[in-house]
Amino acid sequence: MLTIYHNPRCSKSRQTLQLLEQNNAEFTVVEYLKTPLNASEIKDLLSKLEVSAIEMMRTKEAEFKEQQLKDADSETLINAMANTPKLIERPIVVKQNKAVIGRPPENVLTLL
């Protein structure tokens, strides 16, 4: 069973969802803008992704610049994602202890 952290307004997120459906994958959808992740859940995702906090962020969002996060430490970045879910890169697909960012959407095929 997969979990996709999804934003329906994002084309890459929609494409990734479609790819999962085309491959008959069983998955749960979490719309993380409606159900924000807390700092602990974000740390868990970072561990599964095996990336740094900055690599899981949408650094081109206005909120990133407004919050002056460019040179922030990991804890500050994690808290920023918890408080401003829009800053989380999307989509993220998780299978057990492994996760990938669906950019490009084909990245998720490694989990199937």
Image (tube, grey):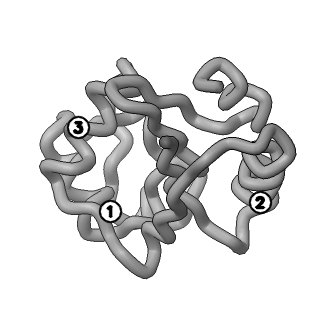
Spatial CA span between label 3 and label 1: 23 Å
According to the picture, the residue beneath numbered tag 3 turns out to be 44
Q: Say what amino acid the circle numbered 1 marks.
A: Gln
Mark 3 residue element: helix
Label 3 vs 2, first from the N-terminus: 2
Mark 1 residue element: loop
**Residue at 36%, 31% in the rendered image:** 96
Q: Say what amino acid the circle numbered 3 marks.
A: Asp
The picture places residue 24, in percent across and down from the top left corner, at 76, 44
Quadrant in the picture for the C terminus: top right
According to the picture, the residue beneath numbered tag 2 turns out to be 14
Out of 77 and 46, give the one closest to the viewer: 46
The picture places residue 53, in percent across and down from the top left corner, at 32, 34
- Total tally of numbered discs in the picture: 3
Q: Residues within 10 Å of mark 2 (few under 14, many from 20)?
A: some
Left or right of residue 50, residue 91 in this image: right
According to the picture, the residue beneath numbered tag 1 turns out to be 67
- On screen, residue 86 above or below 51: below
User: Foreground mark, 3 or 1?
Assistant: 3
- On screen, residue 28 above or below 108: below
